[in-house]
Amino acid sequence: MSTQTATPELRQWILEQARAGHAPDVVLQAMVQSGWDEEVALEALEQTLSDFLSDRSRETSGGLPQAVPVPEPRLEGRTQLRLPDGHEVRVVLQMQSPRVVVFAGFLSDQECDDLRALAAPRLTRSETVDNTTGGSEVNEARTSAGMFFARGETALVERIEQRISALLHWPVENGEGVQVLHYGPGAEYKPHYDYFDPAQPGAPSILRRGGQRVGTLVMYLNTPEAGGATVFPDVRLEVAPVKGHAVFFSYDRAHPVSRSLHGGAPVIAGEKWVATKWMRERRFD
């Protein structure tokens, strides 16, 4: 057990790094390399940054986090794209604010069926990230069952991840594993943001693995009989869940100004299967 204790000098140094704009995972790495026990360093980092962000929030009015690079398809006015694996997708809808693009035919019917078959035996009650601890928890707002594939776990998963990377020009290693979700009748995911709230105490432990989330791709693995749309309340947009289609959206800062609030509307009849890929700022391990 470590006998180290976070000192006022250490907390002051952490504050200086935060004011200089250094990412939490970079600060943590520097502390560990300097000889600090990782658990002690992480606890000091989380508490110090939580206090710092709370104070800054009270002191500023209307200030926004700095925008960061995000995944982006290079459409150049085209509505049909051929990807390096020979697969073709069509653009059927796009918006700039929020940045939303809907692709038709992103997955073939066979790929959808195969991914569902691989995922079905491993489904458990879906959880959400607990921003106060950095862990996960069952949340009443999310009434689906789900599972995660490790990155590149199977040939099919690897092919899909390579396709996503080519389409959105974002490194495969900067993505979380593909998550498959199953929604039965009445199941939903109430409106939420996919980025992690940096003001929450658990943020440093979450962000040290790849930084902030900056983009989401939701792939529809079947077409429900009724309901189940992906909704964007801020702009009153509903994306119908059509088998093989995918909706991409990005958020260049962890703030509601991104207008990336979204949710999964209740399934009215039948069932809904989706696969989700979240993209991070940096390599995710």
Image (cartoon, rainbow, N blue to C red):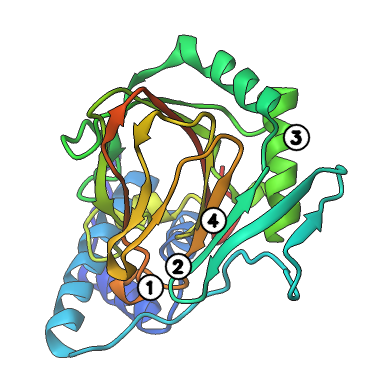
Q: Do the residues labelled 2 and 4 touch (CB within 8 Å)?
A: no
- Mark 3 to mark 1 CA distance (whole Å): 30 Å
Query: How far apart are the alpha carbons under marks 3 and 4?
Result: 18 Å
Q: Mark 4 points at which residue?
A: 248
* Residue of label 2: 251
Where, by quadrant of the figure, is residue 61 drawn? bottom left
Q: Are marks 1 and 4 in contact (CB under 8 Å)?
A: no
Task: Residue 17: name its quadrant.
Answer: bottom left
Query: Which amino acid type is marked by label 3?
Result: Arg
Is mark 3 in CB contact (under 8 Å) with mark 2? Answer: no
- Check disc 2: other Cα within 10 Å, few if <14, some if 14-19, many if 20+: many
Q: Mark 3 points at which residue?
A: 159
The disc label shown at residue 258, or none:
1
Q: Distance between the residues labelled 3 and 2?
A: 25 Å
Residue at the far top in the pictured view: 121
Q: What element carries label 3?
A: helix
